Image (cartoon, helix red, strand yellow):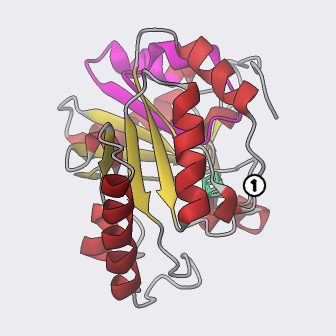
Amino acid sequence: MTGAVTDDLDKHIRVSEIFGPTIQGEGLLIGQPTVFVRTGGCDFRCSWCDSLHAVESRFREDWRPLTVEAIWMKVEALSKGSPLMVSLSGGNPAIQPLGPLITHGKARGYRFALETQGSIARPWFADLDVLVISPKPPSSDMAFNLQALLSCLDQAGARPRTVLKFVVFDEADLQFARVVSAQCPNLPVYLQPGNHTPPPPEAEDAVIDMDGIMARMHWLIGRVMAEEWYEATVLPQLHVLLWGNRRGV
Ligand code: SF4
């Protein structure tokens, strides 16, 4: 699915979970306090998706259709009314009509970051403070659409800080990241080693393959240095190191 999708202001937002404040575990905002609003539904089915509870239709009954006001009451209660960064994730949050929520929160001093795979462009991307586009590499078994990604950048314009983030499991993923990044030479690039651990909810307490993650982290750092890709930032998923697969932290 590509291109702009018309916002329906009357439509409720499908929410999988709202939690925090906690730290952002990945990428540009790693370590920064945030409240997460995770929407339900995704147009992708990545082979290693770690958020199946917000993707697969068998969990649809857990996704509540909420108004902007209802979401905002929860965000304000969690943050005790102190403005902070609200992280919009999914699933693919670009499916949902999030423009009014962003407008509502920004009028109250909150900031908004959104992460998407870059398959659906929305005009309200321009209202974000941070846009993280995470194109899915070959190991995801998903097809990449450069035009869709460029449409997302076009919709975002100059307003948000926009970055690329890539999950990397192997050499093919790394080379994918290089090729896609070369198409967007002005965007900062974040690389993170993939995590093979089965995702929640079935495997909420699964033992994280920490040795595997660390081995991929070392390999990835070595490869980035060998390629002299000095513009890239290599980071682990901090929340996985701290809390494993547990939800809502
Ligand atoms: S795009 Fe993200 S949420 Fe959707 S299936 Fe892939 S990893 Fe999961």
Q: In the image, residue 52 lies at what x, y percent?
A: 63, 66
State whether residue 211 appears in this view.
Answer: yes
Q: In the image, residue 205 lies at what x, y percent?
A: 43, 87
Q: In the image, residue 14 lies at what x, y percent?
A: 64, 44
Residue 244 lies, with reference to residue 140, above or below; the image says below
Amino acid identity at mark 1: Met
Number of residue marks: 1
Residue situated in front as seen by the camera: 38 or 48: 48
Task: Specify start and end residues of the magenta stretch as a single range.
Answer: 101-130
Q: In the image, residue 208 lies at what x, y percent?
A: 39, 85
- In the picture, measured across the screen, residue 246 lies left or right of residue 12, that is left
- In the picture, measured across the screen, residue 232 lies left or right of residue 68, that is left
Provide the secondary structure element on which disc 1 rests: loop
Residue situated in front as seen by the camera: 54 or 104: 54
- Outermost residue on the bottom side: it is 207
Instruction: Residue at 73%, 63% (x, y): give it.
Output: 56
Instruction: Look at mark 1 in the image and give the residue it sits on.
Output: 142
In the rendered image, which quarter is residue 216 located in? bottom left
State whether residue 61 appears in this view.
Answer: no
Q: Is residue 177 magenta?
A: no
- Outermost residue on the top side: it is 158
Q: Name the image quarter holding the N terminus.
A: top right
